[in-house]
Structure formats: C-alpha cells, structure tokens
Amino acid sequence: MHRIPDKLEPYPIGWRAKLGLLVPSHDTGYGSYEYLVMAPDGVVPLETRIPGRSVGIEDFRSLADGAVAAADMLSDARPDIIDFIPTAPCFVMGAQRERDLVSEIADKTGILSTSGGQSVIDALRFVESDRVVMYTPYTAEVQQLTNGYFGDQGIEVLGSRNLSFVDAASINRVSPYEILSDIVALTREHPEADGVFVVGGCFRTLEIVARLEEIIGIPVVGTQQANMFNCLRLTGVDDELCGFGRLLDSPRPVP
C-alpha cells in the first residue's frame, strides 16, 4: 500500500531558473516542446505569445510591436530572464533595433533580457564558428537581410538552402532526416565551413543534431539550442545537456 509522507517538501517550480520566452503566435507547438525537452532539472520555460501570424518578411518586421506588452504580462510570473526568441525577425530588424528592443523589455519589466539573434551570435562564437552555412525555411529576401546581420557581427555566410515557406505548419512537416540529408549536401558544397546554423524554431532538429555533427564534423547550432544556451548561461545554470549537439553538451561560461 502506498503511504503518503507525513510532510512533503517539494522544490518549487523553476527553483534554479525560470526562463521567460516570447514566442510568435504562429508556432504550432513544436518550438515550445523543444524547450521543455532541453530544460535541465530545476529549470522551467514559461511562455507568452506575441502576434506573428505568418513567416513573411512584413510579419517579421512587425513582430517586435507586441513584444514589450507581452513581456510586461510575462513578468507577472517572475521569470529570471525574458528572451525574445525569434531569430529571423531579429535578422530582419537589424542588430541595433534588436538591441533597442531588448533594452525596452528590460526597462519595462526590470528583468534581465536577451534575444534570439544575439543568442545565435553568442552560440556560434562559443563553438568557434565564423564561416557558416545556413539551412532556412525562409525566402531569399530574408536570407539577404540575414547575411547582412551576420556580416555586421563578423560571421561570414558562405551559402544557404532556402525552402521559401510562408507558414509554420509547413516547416513542422519537414522530416528531421530530410533536414539531415539536405545539410550534409550543403556542407559538401562548402567544405570550408566551420559551422552550420539551422534557422527557425519550427524545424525539428533535436532528433538529429548530434548524429549530424558526427557525420559532417562541425558544430550545428539551431534556434532553440542557441536560445537555451544563452538563457542558461545568463541565469548561471552550467549543466552539460547531452544529446543536443556540441553547443549544449560542453561546459558553458556563466556570468
């Protein structure tokens, strides 16, 4: 017979860190799921949606409009950090507007804040990748702006594969092993690359990233992994998370 203990002393939810995530409303759930899968013991992701109904360039440009109000609402849950996680919108708006947005969120909420674009740059620098190829669901127009963003940060984009989707559900339906095959082919076209960035939080990559790195021999960074890396680093959580690629299974510096 199961006996109920006389006294329960459970750890509170997120006793090590609460990660406040600002997620585009077009995310169909896979992005949210990956953060839950990656979160180490004692870390909990908390999310609030911001209006972003498609993955077109104009929606990317306007996605920041609702971010500060959403962050203010999310702050009621008392997260330790607030992360504007979309990466492509950061690339489209540019690094200065991205920094301004992070400052606006921090000023409004009084909470440490970061963003997807900066998380990717920090992640690529951590794995020492400054000549990269990109696998992306977006259009050539978005890619052109992305190349400029990375160039301004000192990272060279050698080539990309752009699938030109216009909705998140289509991105979800791409098989992880189709992604693996495409990236292997892309790195063979650019053997001088020292890293791969998989753009977009709706691609399913967690299942294959470790195996992909074994095959191509260089680090693979995705949107989800980069945001998790930066949130954990900035909140002082230094666990090595095995199975999600070199970025997360290496000891990371914490402030």
Image (cartoon, grey):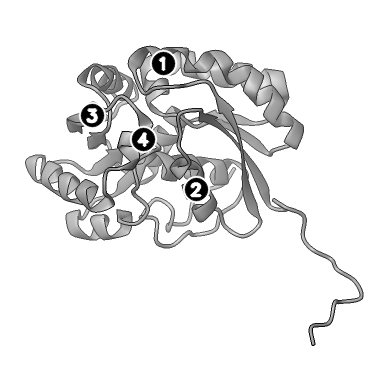
Which amino acid lies under the numbered mark 3 shown in the image of this protein? Glu
Query: In 3D space, how far apart are the residues under numbered discs 3 and 1 (Cα atoms)?
Result: 26 Å
Give the mark nearer the N terminus: 2 vs 3.
2
Quadrant the C terminus occupies: top right
Q: Nearer the viewer, mark 2 or mark 3?
A: 2
SS for dot 2: helix
Q: Of label 3 and label 1, which has the lower sequence position?
A: 1
Please name the residue shown 33% across and 20% down the image: 149
Q: Is residue 205 above or below residue 93?
A: below
In-image side of 106 versus 97 (left or right):
right
Say which mark, if any, is on residue 33: 2
The reply to whether dot 2 and dot 1 touch (C-beta < 8 Å) is: no
- Residue 250 is situated, as x and y percent measured from the top left of the image, at 43, 57
List x then y, in percent, for residue 184.
15, 49
User: How packed is label 3: few (under 14 Cα within 10 Å), some, or many (20 or more)?
Assistant: some
Q: Nearer the viewer, mark 3 or mark 4?
A: 4
| Mark-to-mark CA distance, 2 and 4 | 15 Å
Q: Find disc 3 in the rendering and name its residue.
A: 156
Please report the residue visible at 79 percent of the width from the left and 87 percent of the height from the top. 1
Q: Nearer the viewer, mark 1 or mark 4?
A: 4
Of labels 2 and 1, earlier in sequence is: 2
Comparing labels 3 and 1, the label whose residue is closer to the camera: 1
Image disc number at residue 169: 4
Is residue 94 at all visible to an observer of this figure?
no
Decide which of 143, 203 is in the foreground and name it.
203
